[in-house]
Image (cartoon, rainbow, N blue to C red):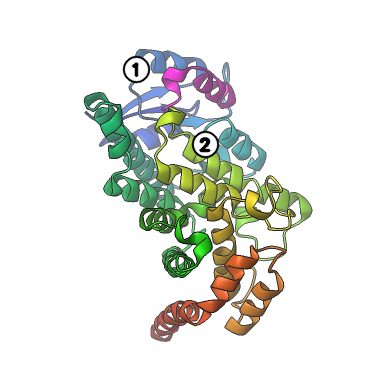
């Protein structure tokens, strides 16, 4: 079955450019929201909508609201088109259910990459739905946890971060490696022996890359700002947690059938910025009310951020980073996890040192 894409834009030029770019797909076009809803009603099997927000008769926001109100259309993925200075519109569109955005004037290469990623995710979604039709409830629950489907889905989502240069693949690999050695070490302690089963540790490691997936919804001028964020900018930045949780929830159609790895991913995404003393966000959870995945991810993410060069800061040395983590025990971090982390700090440092050496070799060759 061919992929079907609806292009909704009142600009004849933009419709023509996008249609030509997507010549390998089956495309439909509409000049405003009213025409778009008519096309969607006639073609409920549409996979992806590329939607301009500023249109006569029925604008893009009204289309997004209509799609969310009808369960039949909620599975349709929508990429919104905005003008360069319409940051508020980008955020509003994402809150109304859009999965991504692209700015005008169009960057054709960027748009095509994002379209291909979302089509890949849609195909995976269709594969799962087809399996659901063939299998009974017990087999369905197991097949949703098939590692191949899980890994492909996660890598496609993480691909969105890498397209926008939000995170590098090195950050993904480092945090996964640290999560693995930290969990394996904690499993030797009585408190965690029964909790950190082999399967659960594998879920934690596999879903670690998703912790900041919601950052695809944060505007570039905030996300890639080299200096300190203002209070308003930080308020916007904090929304990435909810964006990430909502992105995962959009793939869930029945709470009873939620795969355990999705639950783990949602806990990592939704609670890795909570703090042990209750001063974190978004919910201000404290102590062990913070799910274990969030408490683990908090210390791993902060450590890697400290020891890595970012657009807004240099890389701090290992000793300084370890001292900061020590000082935050019982404040930012779970004291028991800090103790375990410090016990394996040499192994953690080995991971950092390996990747630092690779970076230096690449820089030396350039």
State the SS at label 1. Answer: loop
State the SS at label 2. Answer: strand
Q: Of the residues under marks 1 and 2, which one precedes in the sequence?
A: 1
Is 365 drawn above or below residue 42 in the view shown? below
Place of residue 162 in the rendered image (x, y in percent of width and height, measured from the top left) = 44, 57
Place of residue 279 in the rendered image (x, y in percent of width and height, measured from the top left) = 75, 55
User: In this view of the protein, can residue 138 be seen by the observer?
Assistant: yes
Question: Can you say which quadrant of the picture contains the N terminus?
Answer: top left
Residue name at image x 43 percent, y 13 percent: 38
Residue name at image x 61 percent, y 56 percent: 223
The label number, if any, that marks residue 154 in the structure image: none
Residue 72: in magenta span: yes
The magenta span reads 59-76
Residue 4: in magenta span: no
Relative to 158, 225 lies left or right: right
The residue that label 1 is drawn on is 43
The residue that label 2 is drawn on is 81
Is the Cβ of the residue at disc 1 closer than 8 Å to that at disc 2? no
Question: Can you say which quadrant of the picture contains the C terminus?
Answer: bottom left
């Amino acid at each position: 079955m061919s992929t079907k894409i609806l292009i909704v834009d009142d600009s004849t030029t933009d419709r023509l450019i996008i249609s030509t770019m997507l010549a390998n797909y089956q495309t439909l076009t509409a000049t405003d929201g009213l025409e778009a809803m008519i096309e969607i009603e006639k073609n409920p099997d549409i996979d992806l909508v590329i939607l301009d927000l500023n249109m006569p008769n029925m604008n893009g926001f009204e289309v997004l609201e209509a799609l969310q109100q009808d369960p039949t259309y909620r599975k349709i993925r929508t990429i919104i088109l905005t003008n360069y200075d319409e940051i508020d519109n980008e955020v509003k569109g994402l809150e109304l259910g859009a999965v991504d955005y692209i700015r005008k004037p169009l960057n054709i290469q960027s748009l095509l990459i994002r379209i291909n990623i979302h089509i890949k995710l849609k195909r995976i979604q269709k594969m799962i739905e087809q399996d659901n039709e063939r299998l009974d409830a017990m087999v369905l629950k197991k097949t949703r946890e098939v590692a191949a489907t899980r890994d492909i889905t996660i890598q496609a989502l993480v691909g969105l971060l890498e397209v926008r240069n939000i995170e590098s693949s090195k950050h993904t690999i480092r945090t996964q490696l640290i999560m693995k050695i930290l969990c394996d070490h904690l499993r030797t302690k009585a408190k965690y022996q029964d909790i950190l089963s082999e399967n659960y540790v594998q879920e934690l490691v596999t879903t670690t890359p998703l912790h900041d997936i919601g950052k695809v919804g944060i505007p570039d001028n905030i996300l890639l700002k080299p200096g300190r964020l203002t209070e308003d900018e930080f308020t916007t930045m904090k929304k990435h947690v909810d964006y990430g949780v909502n992105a995962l929830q959009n793939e869930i159609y029945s709470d009873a059938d939620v795969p355990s790895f999705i639950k783990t991913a949602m806990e990592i995404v939704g609670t890795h910025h909570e703090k042990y003393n209750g001063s974190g966000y978004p919910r201000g959870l404290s102590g062990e009310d913070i799910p274990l995945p969030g408490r683990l991810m908090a210390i791993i993410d902060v450590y890697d951020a400290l020891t890595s060069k970012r657009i807004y800061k240099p890389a701090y040395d290992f000793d300084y980073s370890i001292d900061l983590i020590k000082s935050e025990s019982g404040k930012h971090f779970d004291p028991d996890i800090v103790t375990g982390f410090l016990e394996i700090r040499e192994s953690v440092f080995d991971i950092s040192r390996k990747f630092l050496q690779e970076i230096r070799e690449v820089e030396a060759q350039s």
